[in-house]
């Protein structure tokens, strides 16, 4: 066989492999049947509530919200952080960022309680000039947040989510290897290229600590601070890392097949990881372009001891499209979307 023929066969084999993997990863062949043992009601007043976290010491929910449909249409509107009581069946969100001196388009967020009892909120911010930052705020109950610091560094490329580890330290995911608006991001998505990463900010400098991930998204830390969990949307799996003697030393321990395009990761009060997910990724791409197009939504929980994956909620998108986060308190389940104009507050039977 000639060298040219061998090259052609290699290219064809690669294309077939990537096509086969893309079909599997996208969930295009999945049957979607609405499943949930409970009832849900919409919570109005929040658009694009992509990430939600609970301060269990106060019972307040913090919501990262941005009108991404407006941004994609070339008409960006200032995003907000909202607060809401988790246990109030009729509680409505209150904006904690009514006026900020910089453009604010929040993405992932993480709460940190300091030794002195004060609370800080860390938020990924995609500014309108194309730069990416992490904003740190002081939490003042339901009063407006106090901005403390803005952080950026070279490896903070296309950040998606973060988890705070100290008053000014955190791990963050970069969902792509190329910056936002770069044409290579599309190639990364459709070819499933493992170019995403995790970085660590030590208070002064950023360090890349994990690489070779496929669209790294949600991230969270075990209670003892020894295990880091990272959601890989395109790979439909959870990557589990053990943290070494220093925060920059990570060792991948295992991957867990979750069966959906898992997004943000939140700890439930049951000690399990909860995540919103996108069972059909191509449907989600259509939903991003067209608000009338449904994108099915998933919620699953993952046992961190056995790594058993339990489906909790699945919907064809009619109730909520593009679920990106799920967090629980008792029998209350809150589900947030990437784009939609409402959240879901659900009661689990």
Image: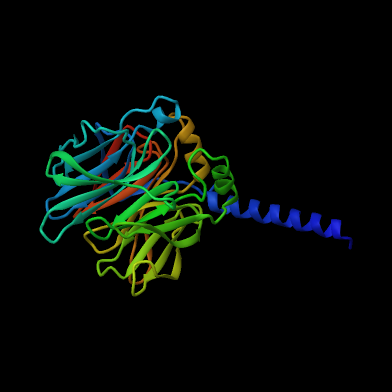
Colour setup of the view? rainbow
Residue 324: % across, % down:
37, 46
Against 212, residue 289 (above or below) is above
Q: Is residue 197 visible?
A: yes
Q: Residue furthest bottom?
A: 245
Question: At 39% across and 70% down in the image, what residue appears?
Answer: 249
Question: At 82% across and 60% down in the image, what residue appears?
Answer: 6
Foreground: 89 or 339? 339
Total residue callouts: 0
Against 225, residue 36 (above or below) is above
Against 154, residue 253 (above or below) is below
Foreground: 250 or 295? 250
Foreground: 259 or 255? 255
Q: Residue furthest right?
A: 2
Residue 22: % across, % down:
59, 51
Name which quarter of the figure residue 82 lies in: top left
Quadrant containing the N terminus is bottom right
Question: At 27% across and 34% down in the image, what residue appears?
Answer: 46
Q: Is residue 332 visible?
A: no
Question: At 12% across and 40% down in the image, what residue appears?
Answer: 142
Residue 254: % across, % down:
45, 70
Residue 19: % across, % down:
65, 51
Against 17, residue 184 (above or below) is above
Foreground: 197 or 227? 197
């Amino acid at each position: 066989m000639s060298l040219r023929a061998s090259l052609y066969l290699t290219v064809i084999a690669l294309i077939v492999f990537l096509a086969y993997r893309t079909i599997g990863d996208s969930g295009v062949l999945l049957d979607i049947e609405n499943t949930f043992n409970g009832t849900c009601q919409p919570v109005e007043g929040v658009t694009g509530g992509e990430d939600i976290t609970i301060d269990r010491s106060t019972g307040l929910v913090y919501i990262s919200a941005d009108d991404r449909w407006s941004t994609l249409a070339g008409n960006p509107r200032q995003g907000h952080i909202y607060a809401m009581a988790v246990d109030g069946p009729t509680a409505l969100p209150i904006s904690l960022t009514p006026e900020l001196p910089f453009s604010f388009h929040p993405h992932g967020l993480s709460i940190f309680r300091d030794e002195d009892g004060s609370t800080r909120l860390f938020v990924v911010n995609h500014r309108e000039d194309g730069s990416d930052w992490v904003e740190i705020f002081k939490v003042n109950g339901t009063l407006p947040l106090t901005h403390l610091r803005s952080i950026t560094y070279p490896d903070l490329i296309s950040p998606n989510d973060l988890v705070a580890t100290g008053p000014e330290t955190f791990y963050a995911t970069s969902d792509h290897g190329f910056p936002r608006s770069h044409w290579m991001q599309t190639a990364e998505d459709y070819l499933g290229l493992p170019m995403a990463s995790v970085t660590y900010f030590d208070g002064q400098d950023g360090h890349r600590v994990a690489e070779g991930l496929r669209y790294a998204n949600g991230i969270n830390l075990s209670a003892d601070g020894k295990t880091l969990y990272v959601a890989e949307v395109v790979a439909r799996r959870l990557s589990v890392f053990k943290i070494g003697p220093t925060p920059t030393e990570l060792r991948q321990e295992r991957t867990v097949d979750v069966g959906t395009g898992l997004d943000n990761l939140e700890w439930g009060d049951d000690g399990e990881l909860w995540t919103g997910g996108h069972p059909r990724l191509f449907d989600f791409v259509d939903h991003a372009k067209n608000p009338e197009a449904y994108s099915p939504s998933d919620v699953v929980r993952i046992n961190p001891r056995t790594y058993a994956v339990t489906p909790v909620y699945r919907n064809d998108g009619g109730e909520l499209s593009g679920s990106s986060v799920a967090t629980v308190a008792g029998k209350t389940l809150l589900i947030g979307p990437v784009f939609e104009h409402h959240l879901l507050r659900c009661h689990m039977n």
